[in-house]
Amino acid sequence: MSRVQTAPMPWLQVETAAGQRNPQSLEDTFTELGAVAVWLRDAGDAPVLEPAPGETPGWPETLVTALFEDSGSEEALRGALQNALPDVELTVRRVGDRDWQSEWQQNLKPQCFGNRLWVMPDDAEVPDNAAIVRLRPGLAFGTGEHPTTAMCLRWLTRQTLQDCTVLDYGCGSGLLVIAALALGARRGCAVDIDPQALDATRDNARNNDCEAQLLIVKPDALPADSQYDVLVANILSGILIELGPELQRLLRPGAPLALTGILAHQAETVCSAWAPWADLRVDDQTDDWVLLSGNKRETQ
């Protein structure tokens, strides 16, 4: 959800048509097998509009592509894929970094979240009166197609962000904090443990002319006295629980916050862990993924 580990090139790219299967289940399987990136795309040419609650992108034919490190054992990967997905027809091929980047750029479609937030590649036509994010994610996760990212983007469109400061913890490609700036936030802070994610965020910030509004750092480089008006954290439930004391310290009293990377059966545990600082509730759900939202308490 938030980041991808650095890996050598070339890569092994696995692709399959979802058919009648839920694309999310295929994505989860590829991730469990060690994919460093997974993305969904349309076999035709349909744009991705905001899905209805409980839906993933509903294309007539969805292609699921996964990128694995090429550790020199293609046969081992094929065997693991066969065991995990015995009835799924897969294609596996080696690709270099440039091949992967080019394919991603060619397949990214304009996506709309809320009434006016658009995430789109560089050459897409800009709608009138829209908040635009031009995306170049490189190998860091975050294109808006994963349910957790989409839920965060929808949540941001429902917030009053004008002149706010926004913290994106586990920033990946920087999509969420750059979207917040496009929606009116004054300044943002993008935090990730992965240097490649921070590089991707810098590149995307430059591409969106907002680098001057962003602090892009590893967690240990955050200023000690930092406090923000809004928090989005798309990580994993265990990390959100572990980092709860630190994350709440970085928020001003009353600040709205959104946490995701959480499966539905984990929501109660995360809510309980955060109970000393905020009353969280399930704000959005897509398949088994949920987004929790609330506000930091004015007093504790």
Image (cartoon, rainbow, N blue to C red):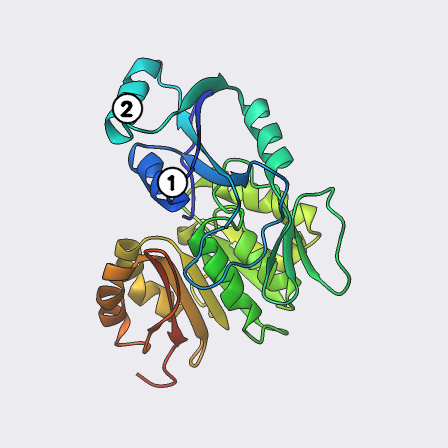
- The numbered dot on residue 291 is none
Residue at label 2?
82
- What is the distance, in whole Å, between disc 2 and disc 1 at their CAs? 15 Å
The kind of secondary structure element at disc 1 is helix
Q: Nearer the viewer, residue 20 or 240?
A: 20
Asked whether the viewer can see residue 234, the reply is yes
Residue at 50% of width from left, 67% of height from top?
155
Dot 2, crowdedness within 10 Å: few (<14), some or many (≥20)? Answer: some
Q: Counting residues from the N terminus, which is met first, the one under dot 2 or under dot 1? A: 1
| Front position among marks 2 and 1 | 2
Write down the quadrant of residue 116 in the picture.
bottom right
The amino acid marked with disc number 2 is Gln
Write down the quadrant of residue 242 in the picture.
bottom left
The kind of secondary structure element at disc 2 is helix
Dot 1, crowdedness within 10 Å: few (<14), some or many (≥20)? Answer: many
Count the labels in the image.
2
- Examine the rendered structure and indicate whether residue 241 appears above or below residue 35: below
Residue at label 1?
27
Residue 133 placement (x, y as % from top left): 65, 53
Residue 185 placement (x, y as % from top left): 61, 68
Quadrant in which the C terminus is drawn: bottom left
